[in-house]
Amino acid sequence: MDFIRSVALINTENLKKNVENLYKFSNKKIFAVVKADAYGHDACIVSKTLSSLDIVEGFCVATGYEGYLLREAGITKPIIVLGGILKQELELFNRYSLTPVISDFSHFEVAQKLEHKKIHIKFDTGMRRLGFYQSDIEKLKEKIKDFEVEGILSHFPSADTDPDYTKSQIEEFKEIVKMLDVNPKYIHIQNSAGVVYDCPFCNTIRLGIAIYGEKPTQDYPVSLYPVMTVLSKVISVKSVKKGDRISYCGTFKADRDMKVAVVSFGYADGLPRSLSNKGYVLINGKYCKIVGNITMDMTIVDVSDLDTVNVGDDVVIVGKLQDKEIKFSDIAKISGTIAYEIMCGISKRVIRKEVK
């Protein structure tokens, strides 16, 4: 794979360490959330790696198609489809033994045609996105008579920012589980940020961002290790004179004679254009500031302070080099977004490669 310019290295040993550390902390088996191509980490690589761990009960995806891709890759553990089931997906759910999360009464019409009849029921305890209300329970009891309710779940919208609200959700969910009275195999509400809350009646956790090495809060009590490193290459080095304008629209004007490098990585690869004139990369052990607007395929950086820089040198977009590091959360902070979005935005042109 020497011909590849930009690569995302997926450290599967760090992935397993993160999952094991989260299990030790929570003492609950895990549903690994691998939707959106495992937050950009390659769902097949991630799922194959975690399938070998007994502490991983199964996987969560967003759509039937995502579940189909995992089955085609050889994944045999349970796959839960968080986004429910639509009529056009029924064949996929039956052929590939996918389990839908039912969160709307309309889902039951399609789910009636499931061959395995296994479902999870989702309740809305505060997200106001998907899920039934506590007031729907009596009607639900009639609807679920023909099904095996394998799981009951809800979701925390602000476990990282609002402890009181989160605790009130736990209490409501506890009451819901008691009222529904179906004795499911899985009861789950805790996500990555939510594992720090006491929730003894739940027996499973759904983990996304944390297994990929990003802490959902600064004081997160679990040791995590970065899973993805994103690398690219220098494709040109040139001199720029004082007063020259750089890149589209000339948003950067050189205040001195400079040396710049062109990196083969742009917004089509997943570097947000909002990092223009604000972000940085790592080259040969030093931070190099982005100058000018990020373009579709390339980014220009200031390398005036580097002793040497040559075409073909490695460029760290995300990852660690010597004692310096760029995290997804660092990029997100500068861009005014969240680490999840940056992870998911690393495009297919950046080839994923498993490393240990």
Image: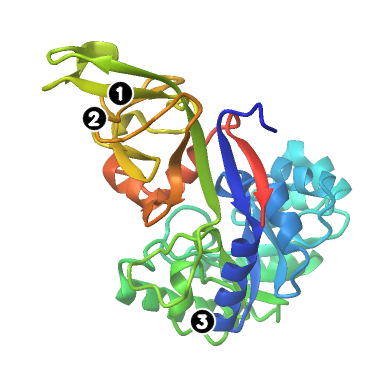
Q: Is residue 176 left or right of residue 183?
A: left
Of the 4 image quadrants, the one containing the N terminus is: top right
Determine the residue located farthest toward the front in the rendered image.
Answer: 307
Q: Which residue is mark 3?
A: 175
Residue 258 location, x and y as percent?
Answer: 21, 22
Q: Is residue 267 above or below residue 111?
A: above
Q: Can you tell which of label 3 and label 2 is closer to the viewer?
A: 2
Q: Marks 1 and 2, Cα distance to the nearest angstrom?
A: 13 Å
Q: Is residue 132 above or below residue 253?
A: below
Which of the marked residues, 3 or 2, is nearer the chain's N terminus?
3
Q: Is residue 272 above or below residue 182?
A: above
Q: Which residue is mark 2?
A: 277
Disc 1 crowd rating (10 Å Cα; few below 14, some 14-19, many 20+) is many
Helix, strand or loop status at disc 3: helix
Of the 4 image quadrants, the one containing the C terminus is: bottom right
Q: Which residue is mark 1?
A: 260
